[in-house]
Amino acid sequence: MHLSVPQQALLDELNGKHVALIGNARALAEGQQGAEIDAHDLVIRINRAPMPAAASHGTRTDWLALGIGLPPEDRARLAPRRTLYMAAKRKRLDWATATSPGFYLHPRYQIEGLARALRAKPTTGAMLIELCLRAELKTLDLYGFDFFASRSLSGRRSAEDVPHDFGAEAAWVAARAEADPRLSLR
């Protein structure tokens, strides 16, 4: 029995689309990009996906990518039509996520490959960028990605408290954006 759809099904769904990938940087709450976010063909959010205001964050969640367990109230609030589980550690993968419509389980070997490139554990956002850019999408616009400069809306931890190298990820994203005009930081 296979619970996960094949990766190619995700890539096919992204083809030809304008995609918004929403990070959880606190700085996003200071802007007014919500309508711009919601105007994309597909909106992807991460983990608990805090949305303090529609004006700053928009309202749509087409895909929800998880690196953590998701409380039922957040699942109900976000109501994604597809859930992606991106963590290498599968112990937090709950039954509600694994049996949700269109569920996708990201392969460990791809997580490990990105970890080698970054020389650190990749964030869910970095894994999504890599995944999305495999598709023939039109654009991938990143919102709420400041590589922990303003910290995260979803917690109180500092950059020193998490197992990621945000400097390496920022450089990796900048290099990808330089090489691939479909990718932009908003």
Image (cartoon, helix red, strand yellow):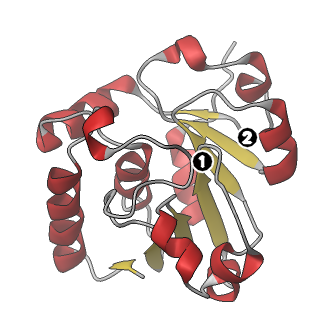
Residues packed near mark 1 inside 10 Å, few (<14), some (14 to 19) or many (20 plus): few
Q: Which x, y percent locates residue 157?
A: 42, 40
Q: Which x, y percent locates residue 41?
A: 66, 76
Q: What element carries label 2?
A: loop
Q: Which x, y percent locates residue 171?
A: 14, 62
Towards the viewer: 74 or 21:
74
| Position of residue 67 in the picture relative to residue 177 (left or right) | right
Towards the viewer: 153 or 172:
153
User: Which mark lies nearer to you, 1 or 2?
Assistant: 2
Q: Quadrant of residue 75?
A: top right
Which residue sits at x=55%, y=55%? 153
Q: Earlier in the sequence, mark 1 or mark 2?
A: 1
Residues packed near mark 2 inside 10 Å, few (<14), some (14 to 19) or many (20 plus): some
Q: Is mark 1 on a helix, strand or loop?
A: helix
**Label placed on residue 102:** 2
Can residue 179 be seen here? The reply is: yes
Q: Is residue 100 above or below residue 175?
A: above
| Position of residue 71 in the picture relative to residue 140 (left or right) | right
Three-letter code for the amino acid on which mark 1 is drawn: Ala
Which residue sits at x=83%, y=32%? 72
The quadrant in which the C terminus is found is: bottom left
Q: In this view, does 53 lie above or below 98?
A: below
